[in-house]
Amino acid sequence: GDSVTQMEGPVTLSEEAFLTINCTYTATGYPSLFWYVQYPGEGLQLLLKATKADDKGSNKGFEATYRKETTSFHLEKGSVQVSDSAVYFCALSAIDGGATNKLIFGTGTLLAVQP
Amino acid sequence: DSGVTQTPKHLITATGQRVTLRCSPRSGDLSVYWYQQSLDQGLQFLIQYYNGEERAKGNILERFSAQQFPDLHSELNLSSLELGDSALYFCASSVVGGPKNIQYFGAGTRLSVL
């Protein structure tokens, strides 16, 4: 079945460091791909998305490119801030005959940014 | 604020009991999803409703059931609760059910079964 694999955390970085969180997926068809972020004590917020191959999603300095050839959707940010500390989830939208878009999530990666 | 409202925020109950979690979707959204977030299983899709009808089922236990009402709010009923049901339960909504549609999540209901 469809699945998402993302790098284990925690990832600890100093402020202004470069961030990469790896995400690869297995899916039939052409799913949409998402990054969601969960700040402490809060729900999930959509960070960015891409709906087809070679699409680049971007938001708040974060970027991810839908790479069909490597089945990847790695999250990057050039300069992280303390306020970026959160858990990041990679997800795909399963096609399932087109009737649903249930999300399949990776295990989440905790990012801790130190001043 | 996503516009998705979940109540209550916290629930503490005992094994064997039954609870109801409530979700109000964003205005205009027809599709509601329920997810469970636990330490051992991660974030898992439970069930989806679209305009009052069940659309898809995931890893939802038989002790759990859900429904979506004519005003589009949804309820997740959990019965014969076990310790392992302790988790964060999220509701999400989207305009329709297609794969390109963004799901907006509520803040969740934290269930503690003692």
Image (tube, coloured by chain):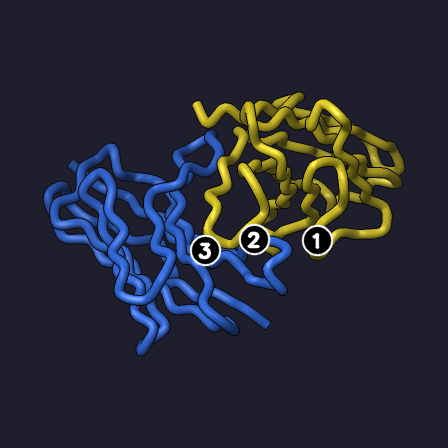
Picture residue at 57% right of the left edge, 42% below the top: B96
**Amino acid beneath label 1:** Ala
Residue B57 picture quarter? bottom right
Confirm whether residue B102 shows in the render: yes
- Which residue position is annotated with label 2? A101
What color is chain B drawn in?
Answer: yellow
- Which residue position is annotated with label 3? A91
Residue at disc 2, secondary structure: loop
Letter of the chain that mark 2 sits on in the rendering: A
**Amino acid beneath label 2:** Asn
Would you place residue B90 above or below residue B20 in this image?
A: below
Picture residue at 72% right of the left edge, 29% below the top: B21
- In the picture, which quadrant includes the C terminus of chain A? top left
- In the picture, which quadrant includes the N terminus of chain A? bottom right
Residue at disc 3, secondary structure: strand
Q: Is residue B36 left or right of residue A31?
A: right
Picture residue at 25% right of the left edge, 56% below the top: A56
Q: Is residue A69 left or right of residue B83?
A: left
Residue B18 screen position, x and y as percent: 85, 32
Picture residue at 63% right of the left edge, 30% below the top: B109
Q: Is residue A87 left or right of residue B37?
A: left
Letter of the chain that mark 3 sits on in the rendering: A
- Which residue position is annotated with label 1? B56
